[in-house]
Structure formats: structure tokens, C-alpha cells
Amino acid sequence: MFDSFRKYNKIIMVFLFLLIIPSFVLFGVDRYQGGGQGEKVARVDGVDITRPDWDAQHRNEVDRIRQQAPNIDASLLDSDAARYATLERMVRERVLAAAASKSNMSVSEERLARLFAADPGLASFRTADGKFDREAFMRATGRTPEQYEAGVRADLATQQVSLGVSGTAFATPAQAAATLNAFYDRREIQVALFKPADFASKVTVSDADLEAFYKAHTAQFQQPEQAKVEYLVLDLEAAKKNIAVSEADLRSYYDQNAARFGTKEERRASHILIAAPQSAPAAEREQARKKIDQLLAEVRKNPGSFADLARKNSQDPGSAEKGGDLDFVTRGAMVKPFEDAMFALKKGEISGVVETEFGYHIILVSDIKPAVVPPFDKVRATIESEVRNQQATQEFAKAAEAFTDIVYQQPDSLQPAADKLKLTIQTAGNVARTPVPGATGALASRNFLNALFAPDTLERKHNTEAIEIGPNQLASGRVVQYAPARALPFDEVKDKVRTQLVAERAAALARAEGEAKLAAWKTDPAGASFGAPVTVSRLETQSQPQAVIEGALRADAGKLPTLVGADLGAQGYAVVRVLKSVPRTPPAPEMAKQENEQLAQAVGAAETAAYYNLLKNRFKAEILVPRPAESILGAGR
């Protein structure tokens, strides 16, 4: 019971979490209205989404992610895939909003009131007298309460559109059995592989062959555009260099925070508790008071009996068996009445009766470790670092404004900004439009590279504008030398051409040999040569190529054993002998239930996706920019 007296820091952290990262309801999906100037990147129900809309939304999403995960790799957030996923989500939001509007979906005042009343984020904006602090809310959210309410209504209405499908999805037992059995289907197989490497020695190519292949595949043998650049980075560390901290500032900071640099006073106490919650009946509390008074009298007569009396009488199960011992604690660890009494006692003293919300206590202070404050000289370096960190944010804001102005107003050189802000001009060669693997800092920022390779920057060799490349990080750069993409001369890439052509022809020979063996072995199975049998499934591939797995599982289970071929592309060809179907071991009841639930969720997701595609067509939703090749994120495909 007494463990609940301790005010764990976790409680404070949870409270701060609610304030810093409010609930979904408080900061729901932002609404953006179409229009404005700029390139049109998407359209929903006749309303355009422009590139500035897209950029603003992506910045907001990146900021939210960075707040929650400060150490996340910035290149992931700036990738083409991440940006495209943001655009897909914007389109999805607008499609669902249009569907909700056309269906006249609304949210009742009662539901909205219940939602607001239960939201801990909103509760933080109420004053002590219960009134809603409108100004504080607007400062924290950037929206008026009316805008927030409208956003919540819109979010809830669009949720109803999706839930109308996903919330009613289910799979019948027969459907579940058929689907799961197919998913877990297993086959015992033997494989004969025909690898291109085994046929490479049989390939002969002439110089004419190589030149013809080169001309037909020139795009594969290009040197991408490259630039030599110079750039500046302004961050908190750079801002700190311009901060001057006097000795007087450090001494003042030490005097105000001296206790924090040392160790706090610690006290070891024991107690006897007779439980009597404030909500208990008066008679029960009176009985508890009589009991604690009796124990106090016994302790006064014989202080040495404290531990024994605690073991026999204390109703704090966490400490009673230890004679009431609570070990060493500092201020802030106990509830206030208990703490005040404990820190008022001297070593060896016993308190009177102390009342808390949990009942009545007798406290014995058995030991005291006094606070230790280190001298100024020992913590001077720590103090200076803290003072600089505190001032760095303000200094960075000032420096960022100056940085932005100078690189724009003096576009022909980065030197003025470097001199003014004491920054070092950095250089890099062979810089491309996309970050290379392992790139860090400014060269890992896709936004920065896009700015460097913008037509105006390339043609005039001007500074880029100040680009945000991370939290409290700005960069500006300029192209010093530029080499456009060019096809490499045949003589430079002849060896590479040979390697690719030989590999392509070797794969063709392997495929032809595999197809010939497949036909021959179907006629004369006795002449076939396979590896050892293995049992495979979609979940347990046994390191077999996916084409082998799919070919084996597509074979008619009623006509086994049989032979099938699998084209492995650049990896050659495989002939697969499918020996038999291997029944799945029936899962345990709990596992079977979990599988059925997961299947129902998958069915719901599939039905929701199908319904969303229907809505996309109905509201003529289209994305007007190409999908990046590496895009694997987003929704509404």
C-alpha cells in the first residue's frame, strides 16, 4: 500500500506526454482546402491540390514525426517515397471527406460533447475555475476552438465512411478454411537448377556483338549528372560559438542551481501504519486513531521495540515485514504530510501521530545523509554547457534570420554569411540529385539537393535559399562546377558491356537447357536428376526462389507427382518435381481463433480498399505526378 505514496517521475512524464503529444482527437488530421497558386499535383472532386499544399502538409507531418522521434534518419523523411505517401494520404482524406459530405454524414452534439469531456489534452486548457482558456489553446494548436471543432467533426464523419465497410466485414468458416489452407499449403519437392554461371563458358561474343548491345542499351552506360558544390550549415552548435558567457553569469547560475549539481539530503525512515482512508466511516477512523495512539504510547515507553511493533501491527504490507523500514528517500518521494514530518525529525527521533490520506502513521528517522553541494570549480564546465544550451535556441533564431537574409541578398558567394556567422564553407564533389547511401548532414537532405539542382541555381551559380535540413538546422549551397549526364564512350565501358551481355546470354542458355530437360523428363522420368526432397510453403521457402514455390503450389494436387518449370530470369531456370501435398498440422484452438480474427481484419482491409477505389473513381481523384520507383508507402493505391 505504501508504495502508492511515492510520487514516481513516471506520473510526471505521462502528464508531460499528454501536453506535448496530445491525443488524436485534439490534433486530428489537418484539413487543407484546395486552391492557391502553384503546380497542380492532384485533383479530387474538381478541387486541385497544388505543390505548395503538398509541401506544407509534408512539412507538418515531418515536424510531428521529428517531435516524437528526434533521432530518426532525416533522409527517410525527405525521400521521394515519403513525400509521395503524404500526397496519397492527402488524396485519401479528400476523397473520404467528399464522400462524407455527399452522404450528409454528421456528428451529434452529444457524441462531440462526450469526446471533448474525455480528452485529456483538452482538459489541460481548463483553468482552475473550470473555464476554457481560449488564448492558450490557440497558442498551442495554431487554431481557434471553432476551427478545431470543425476539424474534429470532419474527421469523425470521414471515419464513418470507412467504418461503414471495415466495421461490418467478416469471413465465414468455409471462407476462412479455404483461404488459410491455401496460405499454409505445403508441398514436398525436388529441384534441379540450371544456373547461368554454368553456361557462361559456352558464350562467345564478338566486338560487333558488344557494340550492338551497347547501342541498344546506351541508357545503362551513362554517367549521371554531377556537381561540385560548396555549402554552409547553421545549427545549434554553430550558434553556440557566438554566445559570450561571463564568469558572473556562471556564478549566478551556480548560486541558483547549486543543489541540483550535488546530491540531495536523504533520510532513512521506518513507520507504522494503521490504515484509515479518508473515505472510511467515522467509527472506523476513530478505531484506527485509538489503535495508533496506543502504539505511540508503547513506542514512547520503549523506542527499541519500534521494529517489532511495526512487524506485528503495521498495515503497510510493503514494509511491515522489514520492521517498517522504507530505506533512504529524498524530498518529493513521499506524500506531503508524511514528508514534512519525516524531514522535521532529527536522527533517532520518533514523530507523533501523522495523518495522511491513507491513514495514521508513526515515523522513526534512523539515519540521515546530508546534502552534498560540489564547489563551483568542479561543476564549472557543466554549468557553462547548460548556460550555452539555454541561450543557443535564442541565438539560433537570430542567426537563422541573418543567415536567410545574407545568402539571398548576396547570392554570388557564401563567404559573407560565413564571415558574419563564423561558419566554415564545406565542399563536396560528385554530388548527384539524390542522396548517396551513407550520406549525412546537408548532403542527405533531398530538399537541399533539389534546391542545388534547380534550374536557376545551376544556370546562375547562385546560392540556394536557406533550406531546413533538420531540427534547428539550415543549409545553403551553390554549384561551383556542373557536368550534365552523358553516355560513357564504348571503350570506357566495354568490359561492363561484355559482362552484361555474357550474363544475359548465359541465362538464355540456362533457360533453354532447363526447358529441354523438362520436356525430356516428362517423357522419361527415369533420366531425371534432382536434389534432395524438401517441404516448402509460402511461409517456409527453405531458401528456394519464389518462382519455385509458386510453381509447386500451383501444381494440381490431384495429379501428383508431376513436373513443372520455373523461369528464374537472370538466375536461370528450375525444373521442379512436386512429389506430394503435405497436410498442415491443425493449429491449437487459440491459434486458430487468432488466425480467423486476422483473416477477418484482412477481409475488412481489402473491402475498405475496394470501396475507396470505387470512391476515387466516383469523385474523379487522380494524382498528376509520377509515382517514384522506390515508393512503397502510402495509401489508396
Image: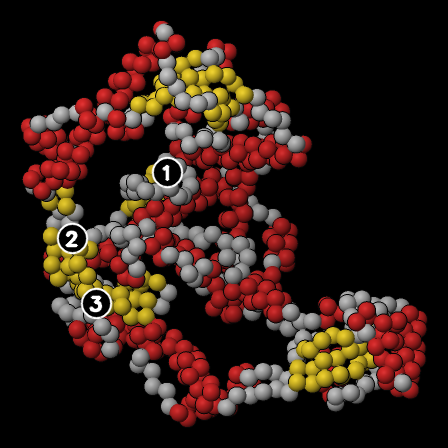
Relative to 141, say whether 112 is above or below. Answer: above
The number of numbered badges drawn on the structure is 3
- The residue at the point 66 percent across, 35 percent down is 590
- Where disc 1 sits, the SS reads loop
Disc 2 from disc 3: Cα separation: 17 Å
| Amino acid marked by disc 1 | Ala
| Amino acid marked by disc 2 | Gln
- Where disc 3 sits, the SS reads strand
Expressed as whole percent of the image width and height from the top left, the position of residue 304 reads 86, 83
| Amino acid marked by disc 3 | Gln
Expressed as whole percent of the image width and height from the top left, the position of residue 454 reads 19, 55
Task: Look at the numbered discs 2 and 1 and tell me whether their residues touch, using CB distance below 8 Å.
Answer: no
User: Could you tell me which quadrant the C terminus lies in?
Assistant: top left
Relative to 523, say whether 203 is above or below. Answer: below
Q: Nearer the viewer, mark 2 or mark 1?
A: 2
Q: Earlier in the sequence, mark 2 or mark 1?
A: 2
Q: Return the residue at label 3.
A: 426
Residue 226: image tag: 2
- The residue at the point 82 percent across, 70 percent down is 320
- Residue 455 lies left or right of residue 92; in this view the side is left
- The residue at the point 23 percent across, 68 percent down is 232
Residue 621: image tag: 1
Disc 3 from disc 1: Cα separation: 45 Å
Out of 578 and 286, give the one closest to the viewer: 578
Out of 254 and 558, give the one closest to the viewer: 558
- Residue 344 lies left or right of residue 390; in this view the side is right
